[in-house]
Image (tube, rainbow, N blue to C red):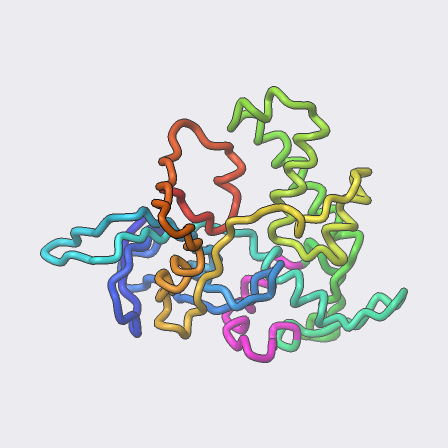
Amino acid sequence: MSSSVWWEGVEKTRVLIAPGCGGNKPGELLTLRHPKSENGTCYLFNNEMLQEIQWFKQSYGSWFLGDYISQDGSLYMATPVDPVFILLPVFDQARMKKGDDPGKFRQLDEILFVEGFPEYQHLLSLAEKCMEIVCQTQEVGSMKFYRLDNSKVLAWLTCKVRCLKKTLPALDKNYAAQEEKQTLVDAVSIVGEYLKTEPWLKLLYEHLGLEFVDPTTKETNTETFPNANENKMEYSHSSQEKGNKKPGKPGKVTKQAKVETGSKNIRDMFSRACKKKC
């Protein structure tokens, strides 16, 4: 069930649609590093499920919430994200791998101690459930130690890509019409939005026998969210809008952007925090 909830410390009303956030436990907003950019990003953690927050905004709009009108017509949506993607860079750094040395085994509380991001500690029980799929483990008495394993990571990533490749043609006729290899490349590109180029994205391309495509050369419309300490869900709309305005030539009227109509490519649904164009 989806619901709209309040968080303590939020100065302005925001509309958030999220699964399972009703009742007395609306969940927690955590500031974690984005697995690709490493920027502090706001995630929703509720009922042992990690969700990323998407932001959509039209040019004009408000919300009528009972007897209250929220001037900000933005819509925030929380969608589940596989926590392995979020924790992968943390486990990679924690093993302290050098060259051919596979690195060190470490306990979860050590691995999740990330300087500047104390809220990773909230994910201890979640990491214990999900990270064995990409890690080697050793038990000494009552203690359990983890070390990221490259072969397991690549096997897990390959499974993700194969599943997505099968799903895309059913979601969008454009994928059904194109060559199978191109659909595989598109699937890798979507998964790559959660992976660092070095080493995982390059290793994944090589593992699948594909020519590497540098994602930095592609245009992106991903938005960066504020972290949970900045009034939780406060977003700097005005500064971004000013940055997007281009000065027109003197004596000419700036042409208004046309409204996009018709169907959109299904890839837009998989892009994190895509800003809706109006």
In percent of the image, x 56 and y 52: which residue is there? 82
Residue 111 versus residue 199: which sits nearer the camera?
A: 199
Residue 249 versus residue 128: which sits nearer the camera?
A: 249
Magenta region: which residues?
A: 111-131
Q: Where 162 sits versus 174, above or below?
A: below
Q: Position of residue 198 (x, y in %)?
A: 75, 58
- Give the left or right position of residue 234, taking residue 34 as reference: left
Looking at this view, name the residue that lies furthest to the top: 177
Q: Position of residue 77 (x, y in %)?
A: 38, 51
- Give the left or right position of residue 103, taking residue 142 as reference: right
- Name the magenta segment's main secondary structure: helix
In percent of the image, x 40 and y 43: which residue is there? 277
Quarter of the image where the C terminus is located: top left
Q: From this viewpoint, is residue 78 visible?
A: no
Residue 165 versus residue 214: which sits nearer the camera?
A: 214
In percent of the image, x 45 and y 62: which residue is there? 225
Q: Position of residue 150 (x, y in %)?
A: 79, 56
Q: Position of residue 245 (x, y in %)?
A: 41, 55
Q: Quadrant of residue 14?
A: bottom left
- Give the left or right position of residue 196, taking residue 124 as reference: right
Count of picture labels: 0
Q: Quadrant of residue 120?
A: bottom right
Q: From this viewpoint, is residue 150 visible?
A: yes
